[in-house]
Image (cartoon, rainbow, N blue to C red):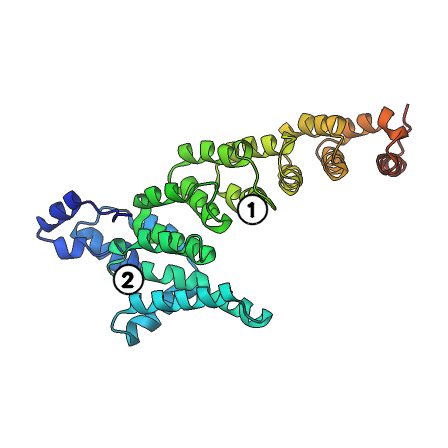
């Protein structure tokens, strides 16, 4: 992979009387230092960088300060420690020690974003080296790269949006898409959720709904949740999660979808049950009307019959 800073950009910067300052990353400093750099020629709004840095692990800034005060090359030292921790996690540790070491990875991956020259660090090389060996470290590194690079991290995120990419890193890439390119994030999200064949022990779909979708605009999030709930081929946990999220958000548009799921679903009783419970919560009157209908499959599905009998008793409904 090549550096995201083009030769032309470097030449343009070198031509400026403020070239040394312009090569320093605004994002790697405090707000006051960032404002100073803006005055010297860095054009990014300080609040945009602040938003990105607010997403970092709070321990990352402290870790950077610690290494910067005692190491001649703090970036190299942090990188070496992150690889050591990643390798220890990969080769196996006792449960308590494993949790402790794993908790250190976010700060280790993100801390280089605070370096004065963070925009010129080899983020792409680090991601390529770690993505399939230390995926949690790679995810933390991508978040650090986003803090340091802003919109210029999008090419890196695109390279991470592949079916073979480990879940933590790919989910982080989709967080970047929703933050910086919502128009690109929506089709990429649809592709991940509905068009790709699920891998064995699929976890990325529920992870996407739970960890990424809250970053999406309300209308796009609703669109994807409705599709995920109704899609019969959706991974079961993701489908259940979509139904529950629609209920917790009190989405009126989900009412006919819940009714349709309850009437059409045959292979997954948990999905059918969740759809009915959500329907009752969203629109009690419509749910009670559905409960009043005697379904043919109740005669052969004892679990469904018992479930509906309990609900009818609770709500005083007699099925016709």
**Is 244 positioned to the left or the right of 176 in the image?**
right
Q: Quadrant of residue 121?
A: bottom left
Between 190 and 93, the one lying in front of the other is 93
Q: Does 9 sit left or right of 194 as displayed?
A: left
Residue 40 pos. (x, y %): 16, 53
The answer to whether 34 is drawn above or below residue 308 in the figure is: below
How many C-alpha atoms fall within 10 Å of the one at disc 1: few (<14), some, or many (≥20)? some
Question: Residue 300 or 34: which is nearer the viewer?
Answer: 300
- Residue displayed at 64% across by 30% down: 230
Along the polypeptide, which appears first: circle 2 or circle 1? Answer: 2
Question: Dots 2 and 1: beta carbons under 8 Å?
Answer: no
Residue 55 makes an appearance in the image: no
Viewer-side residue, 197 vs 121: 197
Q: Residues within 10 Å of mark 2 (few under 14, many from 20)?
A: many
295 to 99, vertically: above or below: above
Q: Secondary structure at mark 2?
A: loop
Residue under pointer 2? 115
Where 288 sits versus 114, above or below?
Answer: above
Give the CA separation, mark 2 to mark 1: 31 Å
Q: Could you say which disc has been placed on residue 207 in the image?
A: 1
What residue is drawn where x is 71% and y is 25%?
A: 260
């Amino acid at each position: 992979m090549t550096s995201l800073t083009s030769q032309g950009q470097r030449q343009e910067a070198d031509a400026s009387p403020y070239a040394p300052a312009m090569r320093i990353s605004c994002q790697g400093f405090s707000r006051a230092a960032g404002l100073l750099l803006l005055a010297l020629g860095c054009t990014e709004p300080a609040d945009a960088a602040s938003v990105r840095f607010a997403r970092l692990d709070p321990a990352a800034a402290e870790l950077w300060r610690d290494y910067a005060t005692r190491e001649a090359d703090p970036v190299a030292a942090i990188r070496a420690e992150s690889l050591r921790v990643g390798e220890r996690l990969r080769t196996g540790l006792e449960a308590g020690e494993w949790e402790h070491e794993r908790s250190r990875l976010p700060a280790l991956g993100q801390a280089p974003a605070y370096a004065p020259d963070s925009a010129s660090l080899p983020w792409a090389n680090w991601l390529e080296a770690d993505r399939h060996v230390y995926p949690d470290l790679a995810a933390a590194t991508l978040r650090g790269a986003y803090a340091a690079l802003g919109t210029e991290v999008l090419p890196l995120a695109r390279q991470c949006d592949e079916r073979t990419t480990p879940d933590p890193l790919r989910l982080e890439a989709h967080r970047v898409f929703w933050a910086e390119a919502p128009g690109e994030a929506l089709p990429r999200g649809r592709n991940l959720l509905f068009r790709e064949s699920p891998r064995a022990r699929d976890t990325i779909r529920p992870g996407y709904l739970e960890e990424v979708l809250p970053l999406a605009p309300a209308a796009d999030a609703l669109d994807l949740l409705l599709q995920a709930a109704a899609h019969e081929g959706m991974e079961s946990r993701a489908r259940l999660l979509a139904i529950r999220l629609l209920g917790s958000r009190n989405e009126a548009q989900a009412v006919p979808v819940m009714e349709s799921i309850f009437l059409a679903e045959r292979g997954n009783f948990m999905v059918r049950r969740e759809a009915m419970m959500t329907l009752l919560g969203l629109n009690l009157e419509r749910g009670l009307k559905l409960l009043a209908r005697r379904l043919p499959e109740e005669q052969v599905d004892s679990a469904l019959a018992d479930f509906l009998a309990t609900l009818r008793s609770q709500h005083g409904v007699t099925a016709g």
